[in-house]
Amino acid sequence: MSTSDETVLLRPATPEDARAVAEIWYPGWCDAHLGNVPDELVVARARESFWRRAAQRVGDTGDTTVATVGGAVAGFVMVVGDEVEQVYLAARHRGTGLAGVLLAEAERLVAANGHERAWLAVVAGNARARRFYERNGWADEGLFDHHAEGTDGPISVPAHRYVKRVSSGP
Ligand SMILES: CC(C)(COP(=O)(O)OP(=O)(O)OC[C@H]1O[C@@H](n2cnc3c(N)ncnc32)[C@H](O)[C@@H]1OP(=O)(O)O)[C@@H](O)C(=O)NCCC(=O)NCCS
């Protein structure tokens, strides 16, 4: 069904969103990471793993926020403490400004978690995301050894650490 309702809303994800989150997460992860990360991580991020991880991360942990356009999930962020863990937009919504709305919400959530500075990890080859973060006021602190969750323990992934002040403090 087509709809002309392009209303954008932000809300905490619910378990019913798990499938929509996975359907954005998996192809988005491939766009961002294939050719940019060690093979071991590509093996650990098999298609099915995104459905499992999405089900874990929506609802019960409470760390996922979705953006809906006309009632359909168009993107999401996951915020844990001071880290913006995931920022993903369905391909057809990229370049529309919606990603900026999601990132601003992620920054607000980090501040609401009691932190003055937010951080995130992005792989060097993800030029689009890096440009997006920089345009939104995030600073590149350089390469570090990011430990991504793997099947048999953490996987070392060289990544850039980006930071942004999100609160003026006391
Ligand atoms: C990262 C993401 C959320 C950004 O949202 P977006 O709507 O695509 O971002 P925007 O279009 O507003 O900004 C992207 C910028 O990169 C530029 N850009 C596009 N493709 C590029 C490329 N291949 N190399 C460098 N810059 C690129 C755009 O021109 C734009 O810069 P500008 O505003 O100066 O013109 C979205 O692309 C996405 O979901 N990507 C897949 C998942 C991902 O990478 N998530 C982040 C993981 S850390």
Image: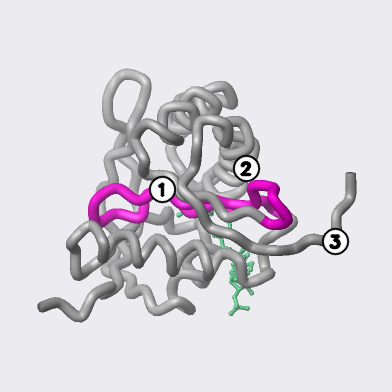
Q: Residue at x 35, y 27 (%)?
A: 150
- The percent coordinates of residue 156 (x first, y second) are 30, 38
Mark 1 Cα-neighbour bin, 10 Å: few <14, some 14–19, many ≥20: many
User: In the rendered structure, which segment of residues is drawn in magenta?
Assistant: 69-91
- Mark 1 highlights which residue? 78
Q: Is the residue indicated by label 2 positioned so its CB lies within 8 Å of ligand 1? A: yes
- The percent coordinates of residue 35 (x first, y second) are 55, 44
The front one of 53 and 150 is: 53
- Mark 3 highlights which residue? 4
Ligand 1's quadrant: bottom right
Question: In the rendered structure, does residue 86 fall within the stretch colored magenta?
Answer: yes
Q: Residue at x 61, y 31 (%)?
A: 19
The three-letter code of the residue at mark 1 reads: Met
- The percent coordinates of residue 47 (x first, y second) are 59, 26
Q: Please report contact status of discs 1 and 3: CB closer than 8 Å, yes or no.
A: no
The front one of 106 and 158 is: 106
Earlier in the chain: of badge 1 and badge 2, it is 2
The three-letter code of the residue at mark 2 reads: Ile
Q: Quadrant of the N terminus?
A: top right
Residue 24's disc is 2
